[in-house]
Amino acid sequence: MQNTAIAGLDHSIIGVNDLEAAREAYEALGFCTSYRGRHIGWGTANYCIMFGPDYIELLGIVDPKEFTAGLEDFLKGGEGGLKIIPRSDDIETTRHHLVETGFDPQEVKDLGRALEMPEGDVIPRFKLVHLPPEKTPGLSTFICQHLTPDLVWRPEWMTHPNGAKAVHAYTILYDDPRSLAEVYERLFGYDCYCTEGRLIVETGGGKLVFCRQDCLTELHPGLVWNGRTGNGAIAVATIAVEDTDVTAKVFKENGIAYSRRTDGSLLVQPELACGIALCFQAI
């Protein structure tokens, strides 16, 4: 198998209308959030929810006069999952893989953000490779390599009252999931698994589950989905936790509505999590 240097899923981005309100909502769900980060030269800022292998980024606009990387247009359709980004351990090797396998990647670009720490700003830095949207149908993405991981994977941000350890999987709407198998086997280098109405993509760390909308409630019983319905809409993040009873206790203490499913997992509807449903599962 060709060396892709892709090490699974790095993070997802949730576009939000009010960044501070989003932070408060996720803290009420039992997540610990980072300090605020401001993208250098852009009009966007974020809070990150850090796990051992990956994280969730809450992204909002703090200066609409500056570049927002398409977030302003996205939010016209409401809050929700914006992108899911794989991580590279060696961005040049990954770019070579992408060229060789026909993904037509752009050149490597640098990105930094000012992380607003009490002692003063620090600058986490990254290298990115963007892909043409048509090359990854159903997935708006780019590839990211962290140059300064210790600045963001801080122990104090990785211990969550709800017991969250990682994002186990993302459920993404797509009309014909089976048609995506070849693309994502080529991208990640793993065999995909097809069932009726869904495609499970292994990435090396975290799963992508492409699902027809008519199969969504079969996969996630009790979900009331009023969000985006087009191909690529990110509907659910399944969060691996230590113990769902611990998670439920946090929800009850904070007044969070949830349902417990027959498999023991907990479901939080999308209106409580900025447009993406959250499933908490003991894994």
Image: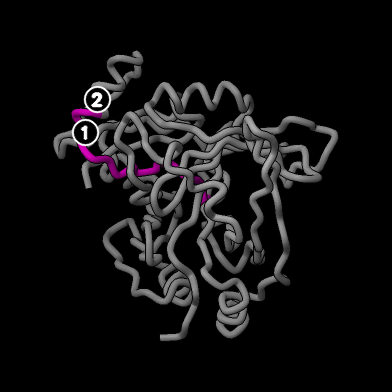
* Amino acid type for the residue under numbered disc 1: Thr
- Residue 25's spot in the image, x, y percent? 48, 23
Residue occupying image coordinates x 34% and y 74%: 191
The N terminus lies in which quarter of the figure? bottom left
- Residue 24's spot in the image, x, y percent? 51, 21
Residue wearing tag 1:
244
- Residue 180's spot in the image, x, y percent? 45, 67
Q: Are marks 2 and 1 in contact (CB under 8 Å)?
A: yes
In the drawing, what numbered circle is on residue 248? Answer: 2
Residue occupying image coordinates x 19% and y 29%: 245
Residue occupying image coordinates x 57% and y 48%: 151
Residue occupying image coordinates x 76% and y 45%: 40
Q: Secondary structure at mark 1?
A: helix
Q: Which residues are magenta?
A: 231-246
Answer whether residue 107 is visible to the viewer in this image: yes
Which residue is at the front of the view, 23 or 101? 23
Answer whether residue 75 is visible to the viewer in this image: no
